[in-house]
Amino acid sequence: MQRPALFIAVCFVIGILLGHRVAVSPVLFALGAMAVIAAGYALCRTRGAAAPSLRVFMALGLVFAGAFWYAVHVRVVPANDIRRFCDQRQRHALAGTIVRSPDARDRFTLVTVDVDSISLGVVGWASSESPGMSTATDRAAPVSGRLQVRLNSDIDPGVYGDRVLVSGRLRSPQPARNPGGFDARTYYASRGVHALMSVRDEAGYRVTRRNTSFTWQTGVIDPLRNSIDRSIDQTMRGDSAALLKGILLGARRQLPEDLLDTFRTIGLAHILAVSGLHVGLITLVIYTLLSVLRLPRNIVVAGTLGVLVLYAFITNLTPSVIRATIMAALFLAGRQLDRQTDTVNILAVAAIVILLIWPSALFDLSFQLSFLATYAIITGYPRMKELLPERISRSEKWWARWLRDGLLVSVAAQLGALPVVAGTFYQVSWMSAVANLFIGPLVFLNTTFGVLTALTGPLAIEIARLFSAVNALVLYAMIHLSKAFSGAPSALVEVPAPSTLFFASFYGAGLLLLWKPDGSRGRRTRRTRHGLLVLCLLVFCYNLLPDRSLRITVLDVGQGDAIFIACPNGHTLLVDGGARTPFYDAGTRVILPFMRAKGYRRVDTIIVTHPDLDHYGGLRAVVESVEVGEVLSSGVGSESGSYRAWREAVDRHGIPYRAVAKGDTLSALGGVRGLFLHPDPLFLSGTAKLNSNEVSVVLRLSLGEFSMLLTGDIEEKGEAATVRRPSMLKSTVLKSPHHGSKSSSGSAFLNAVDPEAVAVSAGMYNNFGHPAPEVIERYRRRGAEVFRTDEGGAVMIRSNGRYWDMAHFAPPAPIGPTPRQVVDGFLLTGKSPLSIFR
């Protein structure tokens, strides 16, 4: 086996994916591993050892081992784990130790605490650490786990190693609850954090004991980081200083937003987040400096490794830095021992080490981009170089070879990371490879002079200023080059989130193109490769086919409504838009990310069911960000300032606005029929005695045998008005009126609708008691399946007119990361990928 580490790493990764997807006890995976080992041993004893058979059993054993290792770290939750106390209505007080240097932001500070004690259901407690607080010591209990506390910026957070007491409500990080949403659960789990808390005043946070002992963090790492930061501040100013801190330390908060956008536009934002590139440059700079001093090679290697370890800690041990540090260490060790090294095998060793320590790192974006881009460069660059005609390679000048090689390396890295970048940011920069060709050398110069500034700053500030003066010119050139590249037409292209089929076909084709069959069976394997390439191409083309079904998404916007509808002909409707407050905008936080993820660039029709803030608030961001064809409403408005601002935004963008009433229809929906059933003009004449909920627009959408009734917030009187013609209400799916409140979903109304399923839009832990338990029970007694946004995130509905399917985007799951099952962009939870409809 040429690359045993690569074989082990791939099998282990597959196992982690299996453990992530299948939420079962680790014992089952352990039993599977033992069964595979026993079967392999028995086969060898009875029939002799055959290499292919042994590899199969080894692969299966490693897959089960990976699944077991992941499940042990993620699925197994001790009885006293902090996750078991999250999402409860009572407050808790916890004691623990700060394990990371507090991260100060503009308005708040993030503090990471390893907790060890908790008081059950009380605000404070009495102990030797916090005398004078509550005396509920009999209710204190040991607890384990890592908590991230968000403090107001005026509260003293303490430092690494301090003992603290915090009190408040524990929240568990939530998975992405809508397509395009942020998956906080996986993000925090990959960093070892499983509980969150916000503290707004000093009563909820207290440093109980200062750390006075020497620690690696406070005695070495923090002083070094502060020294580098201080050297840059003393020798540079403005955007140049902020940019150098971003390149050397990954500190981007001081950078102006427009400069950050510039780097994002040209696809080079990664140079502002410390990655393997920076570690490689630091390695080259330090190794060269020590070699110039004519030190013995073992001293040079040891000194370089020591600096790399310090740098990894200074930059907070991100997966990409750990990967690059391990690879650099193995390369340097091989050089010291005069041994040849296989780069791919070294990359695999780095992956194995990280995943053994930190199995959830597989789902960390930094880990994914780092390993994919590095593997693509190692394997793809030589392969692309081979494709160039030999006569061209021989006749090139040195500068032409430099340009060619730089461009090929950039293209290889971009291709390796392309699907992950597209699936995370929904944007791809075609300028990235070209811009990197010119800005990459400048980054090398920045790093070199930045390291020299950091080394000389504490010793001779005047010498450091000389290095910084040169660096300032380089940074000036980098900033202006970046702005020039970002000004290219369509430098940044928005793309929808790639589907599972796209990932499989893209990476499958890439691996097949890298595969070079040789040996006696080369012709047969080449035929096999060509056949598989054709299969990948067919899958890729199938993935590009437009979806001709009706897709309805009841978005989770908290306590409010927002329903996005995509018709078979591409016509899009948005019914309501959630709330907008000083702290939350459903349009910015939910609707627009959803549209970017799905590839929608326009809303043809917006329907405002009624003038309540939790239904129209988020629509302002929509009309200000994307093209909108028309806005429809019941014609009933509001005198509130927020409603006036919404109407002004509509008028400012020249969007047609009209009222609809019972009997009106929607056309050009690609076979979908839209019929408005409420409000009736006669009903509207009595609105002075009614609240705004009762005049909500009621819309029935139908396609073939499937139909859905959208009801806004109608209550008893609105429902009574619609049931006068009960035959018009019969629908397959009902959007629960008024978030499932007690004053809605009366028996007469439900008898007329007779739904097979109900979608309830309500906020988690809302203060209104929505949905009411008796209403949910009423639905279930009728045999209707209930889907609630407060429990499972967005509700996804899809129909071709004959069959239909309905599922949560983030279904309730055991403690741990929630897997997403996406087939052609549609979530089908717990069902065969081939069973699109039911």
Image (cartoon, helix red, strand yellow):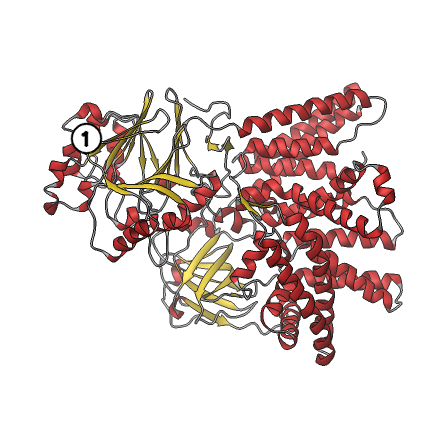
Q: How many tags in the picture?
A: 1
Residue 516 visible in the picture: yes
Residue 39, placed above or below residue 681: above
Residue wearing tag 1: 749
Q: In this image, 614 relative to 142: left or right?
A: left
The picture places residue 570, in percent across and down from the top left corner, at: 42, 32
Q: Which residue is drawn at 75% across and 27% down?
A: 54
Q: In this view, does 623 lie above or below 151?
A: above
In this view, the residue in front, 319 or 259, is 259
Residue 762 x %, y %: 31, 43
x and y percentages locating residue 792 in the rendered image: 40, 39
Q: Can residue 273 be seen in this view?
A: no
Q: Which residue is drawn at 21% across and 35% down?
A: 745
At x 71% / y 60%, what residue is drawn?
442
Residue ID at (20%, 39%): 714
Q: Is residue 424 above or below residue 720?
A: below
Residue type at mark 1? Phe
Direction from residue 478 to residue 175 in the image, left or right = left
Q: Is residue 575 left or right of residue 837?
A: left
